[in-house]
Image (tube, rainbow, N blue to C red):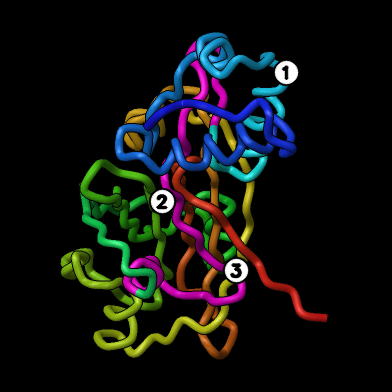
């Protein structure tokens, strides 16, 4: 693609640069994390000031199309997956509905002793044995989310279930438990060393932390779930109707 703008055009230079960059980031070599040419080199090539170039890149950065990293440069944001607060589904259902292929990179089942937080939610005694399911999931190019799910002892799950199946399918079909209500908390956090290793990102990079407190139709607790998402690959969306 030829990097050129029309200095005689009545269209403002920053608007021309914006249009040029939008075309540039759709090219295969720049999609999904490709680095753009250095700012100083691009400005010289186009015959514009760095401030004019910055006007265009700032707008695309605000839209989430570009990511500027100190000491690295400006790169094209990877295609993100948007998940909705107003349409609660299991992860498998969410990805399936969006046509997003995913795979399980790791599945681990273990028994843990309930800490104060789990004991309060499940209304059991501290140190009660709780089944914990850990799953590292992602696309063909790598993992993008790590989940930990804890289940109420009342369900009587054994830990020998086939957890390659959708989780809520197991609960409904095998244990006649219907997840009905999910209270959710969202927060941003810097990736710890272990989270960074799991998601194949750098320590300190942003992750989205999503907690779910899931209950049945009678309001009885079923599952506590916490997920750590690669923030560059996920967008959380909510629709509010007045």
For the point 51% across and 63% down, the residue is 83
For the point 57% across and 25% down, the residue is 68
Q: How crowded is mark 2: few (under 14 residues within 10 Å), some or many (20 or more)?
A: some
Q: What segment carries the magenta color?
A: 67-96
Q: Is 83 on the left or on the right of 147, as rendered? A: right
Q: Is mark 3 on a helix, strand or loop?
A: loop
Q: How many labels does the image show?
A: 3
Which residue bears the numbered disc 3?
A: 85
The mark that comes first in sequence, 2 or 1, is 1
Which residue bears the numbered disc 2?
A: 113
Q: Between marks 2 and 1, how big is the CA–CA gap?
A: 57 Å
Q: Would you say the residues marked 2 and 3 are in contact, meaning their CB atoms lie under 8 Å apart?
A: no
Q: Is mark 2 on a helix, strand or loop?
A: strand
The mark that comes first in sequence, 1 or 3, is 1
| Nearer to the camera, 36 or 135 | 36
Residue 51 — which label? 1
């Amino acid at each position: 693609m030829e990097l050129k703008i029309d200095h005689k055009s009545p269209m403002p230079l920053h608007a021309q640069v914006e249009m040029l960059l939008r075309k540039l980031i759709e090219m295969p070599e720049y999609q999904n994390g490709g680095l753009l040419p250095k700012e100083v080199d691009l400005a010289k090539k186009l015959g514009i000031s760095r401030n004019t170039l910055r006007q265009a890149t700032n707008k695309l950065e605000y839209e989430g199309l570009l990511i500027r990293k100190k000491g690295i440069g400006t790169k094209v944001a990877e295609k993100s997956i948007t998940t909705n607060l107003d349409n609660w589904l299991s992860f498998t259902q969410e990805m399936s509905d969006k046509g997003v292929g995913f795979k399980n990179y790791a599945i681990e089942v273990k028994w843990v002793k309930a800490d104060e937080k789990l004991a309060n939610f499940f209304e059991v005694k501290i140190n009660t044995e709780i089944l914990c399911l850990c799953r590292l999931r992602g696309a063909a190019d790598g993992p993008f989310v790590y989940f930990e799910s804890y289940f109420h002892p009342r369900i009587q799950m054994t830990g020998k279930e086939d957890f390659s199946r959708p989780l809520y399918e197991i609960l409904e079909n095998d244990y006649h438990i219907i997840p009905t209500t999910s209270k959710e908390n969202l927060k941003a956090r810097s990736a710890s060393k272990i989270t960074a290793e799991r998601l194949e990102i750098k320590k300190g990079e942003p992750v989205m932390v999503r907690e779910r407190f899931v209950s049945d139709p009678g309001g009885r607790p079923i599952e506590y779930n916490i997920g750590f998402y690669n923030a560059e690959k996920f967008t959380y969306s909510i629709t509010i109707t007045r």
